[in-house]
Structures are given as C-alpha cells and as structure tokens.
Image (cartoon, rainbow, N blue to C red):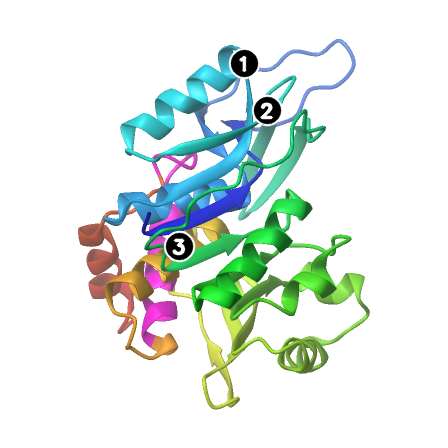
Amino acid sequence: MQALFIGQAYIDVTMIADAMPSGDDKSVARDYAVSFGGNAVTACFACAKLGFTPDLLASLADDWLGRMFLDMAAKYQIPVHGRKVRRSSLSFILPREGKRAILRARDDDYLHPFPRLNLGECRALHLDGHQADAAIHYAKVCREKGVLTSLDGGGLRSNTHDLLGFVDIAIVAERLGEQMNLDERGMLDYLKARGCKIGGITQGERGMIWYDESGEVKRLSSLPVPSPLVIDTSGAGDVFHGAYLASWLGAPDAPWSRHFEFARAASAFKIQHLGNEAGLPAQADVANMRALYDKA
C-alpha cells in the first residue's frame, strides 16, 4: 500500500445545459459525462492516474451503481476496501460559467464497522472528513507510524477540530472559514494552532493562500486558463489534492511549494474537461499545462 484515501463514493452525472427545466418543462443537455465522484475518491483516482497505486476505503453498495464504481476503480488498478451501505450515492452536476450546481443523494448509513487494514508500507493518508470514525482512527494510527496525513477540509464536520490534531497537511475551502466565522488569516492561524505543519485555503480562480514549512504565509495564483476553455470546475479541488500527494510520493524531500505548483497545473487540466474521469491528468498533461501557462 503506497497511500490510503478514505471517503464517500459517488457516481457523478455531469451535464452541460443552457437552462434547468422546472415544472413540466423538458430540455436536452448539450453534453454529459458519467464518472466516479466524491472528494477523497476523486483525489485517489487522480493520484492513480499520475502513476501511483493508492488504496481506497469508501462506501460501497451491492447495486448496479456500486458495480459500475468497482469497474471504474479496476481500470485504474485501485484496491477498494468497501464499507457497505444499502444504496450507492449519486450526484447530478450542472457546470455553467465557471460555477457548478450540485444535487446529491447520499447514503452514509454504514451497515458495518470500518475495516481494519494493514497499512504495511503506507506512506500517506488522505481524508475528507467522511466516515468520521474511520478517519480519526487511521489519522491516529498514521501519526503514530510517522505516515504523512492530509485533509481536504471542504466544510465543517463534527470531527473537524479533533481530526486536525492528527493532520500534517490541511488544505481547506473558503467555506470552512465562513462556517467558523474566520477570515483567511484567522483560518491559517487556527490550522497552525491545531499543529498542521502545512496549511492552506483554496480560493477557486484566485488560487490559494497557504503557509509553508517555516510558517511563512504565501499566495499561489491559479494558472491563467482562458475563460472559453473552462468547461467544468467540479472536481478541480479534488484533483488538486490527489496531485500534490502524487508529487510528494514522487519527491518527498522537495519543498511543498513544488508540490502545490504541480497540483495547480493538474487542476488547470481538470477544468478544461467534462467530468472527473476525463479531467484526470497524466504526468505529460501536467507538464503541458505548466509549459502553456506557468509563464503566462
């Protein structure tokens, strides 16, 4: 096991439409994609596409969507440790003008305790706060073993404060600060106080503000992808997480600025493609994004 990702699995249906019908109206989408979804799940697939073999602990139902999900994971040679639920979770995503509306149906009523895995030679753990019991258990185990722990803090959850005490790399969304009534500096100070060695706040097209190994606060701008090329921003943050972990797995002694610059280019690739699977970059795609936009 090179890395372990823990989250909630979805099947995403992403549609490009000019309008959302209501009442008895009907409309035809211009394009669509069906893919895997979920924060840590998509990050896991991104890490796999970039050349690593992460394990995934995720919700899994014995239904046709669950079997579809397993087929998707098998394509990327991702070992899935399923935690049983009655029904698969589903997302409908409507990207438009750089934003995306999402309607989700989620089953997180887990029928069994989380599986106890042998971490073996695991080098990194990535969490998104789902499966709160499993997240805190493996965060503690990995902290004891000296395994790098990473958190995608997309929003405030019941275990967020406790979980951050066992997290090395915490990259959170602006939404978390809003929920906690903290401005960006207040949020960075909070992450430092919780013991996170690296902390940051993703800000969409404005990039990211973060502090490095020395505690110095920095800004990382997003790459200037032309607006007409931006198709689907959904999943861009998840790809960012998976990409910085892939970069770290490949060069653990490199500074985090290098890992985040790599991840920024991976996200620039994602937003130019419809759906999560089409938006997964390979190493060559990341290099191409950097060649196109890094000096723009």
Quarter of image, res 88: top right
- Report the residue marked by disc 1: 62
- What residue range appears in magenta? 258-278
Where's the C terminus, which quadrant?
bottom left
Q: Are marks 1 and 3 in contact (CB under 8 Å)?
A: no
Q: Does the magenta stretch include residue 289?
A: no
Measured as percent of width and height from the top left, residue 84 is found at: 59, 24
Q: What element carries label 2?
A: strand
- Report the residue marked by disc 3: 267
Q: Do the residues labelled 2 and 1 touch (CB within 8 Å)?
A: yes
Q: How many marks?
A: 3
Measured as percent of width and height from the top left, residue 111 is found at: 68, 24
Q: Which amino acid does label 2 sit on?
A: Lys
Q: What element carries label 3?
A: helix
Q: What residue type is labelled 3?
A: Ser
Sequence-earlier tag: 2 or 3? 2
Q: How far apart, in angstroms, are the residues tagged by discs 1 and 3?
A: 32 Å
Q: Is mark 1 on a helix, strand or loop?
A: loop
Instruction: Locate residue 112 relative to residue 228 in the image: left or right.
Output: right
Q: Is residue 268 magenta?
A: yes
Q: What residue type is labelled 1?
A: Asp
Mark 1 surroundings: few (<14), some (14-19) or many (≥20) residues within 10 A: few
Instruction: Locate residue 138 relative to residue 32 in the image: left or right.
Output: right
Residue lying farthest right? 181
Q: Nearer the viewer's eye, disc 2 or disc 3?
A: 2
Q: How far apart, in angstroms, are the residues tagged by discs 2 and 1?
A: 8 Å
- Report the residue marked by disc 2: 84
